[in-house]
């Protein structure tokens, strides 16, 4: 099991702007743009990016089930599809830390809904930036042979992989070591956290799906990504 704290992540200058523009109906006025700049600095200063992961050998995949040598089982048609022909998998949890949640909650309690929305948009994008940094670390760990490659990541709660599968992920690593816990609804706390799995194996055999959104039919999803985004 490996843990990384205070990860160095690349943050674009327009962090949160595109996502917030979509939320606000396609336009940001001057006041909102000024608030976006102010809250971006607050969010960046308050985050504490962390990553924990561990590697597991895949025993077999039968139907919708992925069996690990550890005895753990993932169940779902898409996670089994993505991990097909992978020999190993890396299970991970990453987080921006609890202070982000506290700040958004404070704004909501003060009745400043707009600030809360803006900070939520910024930190949603910051979590994506953390995901890119984490991906580089995880792939460097998982690709141990010249002929090997990596699948895309897939997470509980994405299309046809139930959120209840978080429980299985949390049994395979120890997210509490980076301050992340699972609540009764199988949601992670802090909320600006994410989990998932990458598969690794011979490049010519593993899944060629580049990003999880490719297999989701929700074309109008506000968070939909492409391989180039």
Image: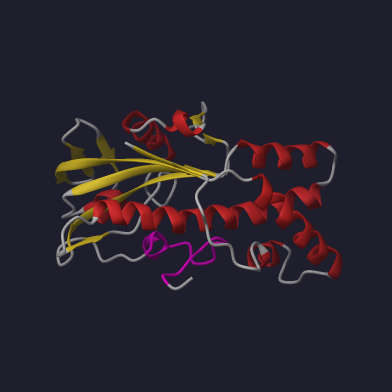
Left or right side of 10 for 119: right
Is 221 inside the magenta-drawn segment?
Answer: yes
In the image, what residue occupies the spot 22% across and 54% down? Answer: 200
Q: Position of residue 176 (x, y in %)?
A: 46, 28
In the image, what residue occupies the spot 60% across and 67% down? Answer: 12
Mark count: 0
Residue 191 falls in image quadrant = top right
**Magenta part, dominant SS:** loop
Q: Quadrant of the N terminus?
A: top left
In the image, what residue occupies the spot 45% across and 30% down? Answer: 177
Way the structure is coloured: secondary structure
Q: Position of residue 15 (x, y in %)?
A: 64, 63
Is 222 inside the magenta-drawn segment?
Answer: yes
Left or right side of 178 for 91: left
Q: Nearer the viewer, residue 205 or 7?
A: 7
Find the magenta span and give its range: 211-227
Q: Position of residue 17 (x, y in %)?
A: 68, 66
Q: Nearer the viewer, residue 101 or 7?
A: 7
Q: Position of residue 225 (x, y in %)?
A: 48, 66
**Residue farthest toward the top in the current orientation of the protein:** 184
Residue 16 falls in image quadrant = bottom right
In the image, what residue occupies the spot 70% across and 67% down? Answer: 21
């Amino acid at each position: 099991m490996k843990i990384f704290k205070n990860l160095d992540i690349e943050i674009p200058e327009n962090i949160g702007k595109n996502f917030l523009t979509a939320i606000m109906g396609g336009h940001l006025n001057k006041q909102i743009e000024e608030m976006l700049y102010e809250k971006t600095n607050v969010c960046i200063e308050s985050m504490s990016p962390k990553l924990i992961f561990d590697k597991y050998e895949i025993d077999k995949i039968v139907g919708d089930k992925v069996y690990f040598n550890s005895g753990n089982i993932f169940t779902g048609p898409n996670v089994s599809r993505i991990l097909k022909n992978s020999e190993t998998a890396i299970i991970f949890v990453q987080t921006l830390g609890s202070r982000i949640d506290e700040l958004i909650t404070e704004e909501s309690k003060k009745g400043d809904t707009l600030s809360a929305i803006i900070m939520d948009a910024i930190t949603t994008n910051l979590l994506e930036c953390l995901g890119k940094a984490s991906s580089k670390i995880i792939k460097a760990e998982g690709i141990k042979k010249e002929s090997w490659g990596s699948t895309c990541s897939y997470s509980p709660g994405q299309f046809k992989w139930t959120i209840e599968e978080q429980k299985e992920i949390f049994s395979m690593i120890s997210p509490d070591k980076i301050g992340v816990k699972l609540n009764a609804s199988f949601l992670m706390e802090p909320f600006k956290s994410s989990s998932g799995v990458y598969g690794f194996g011979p490049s010519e055999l593993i899944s060629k799906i580049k990003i999880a959104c490719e297999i989701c039919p929700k074309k109008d999803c506000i968070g939909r990504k492409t391989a180039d985004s």
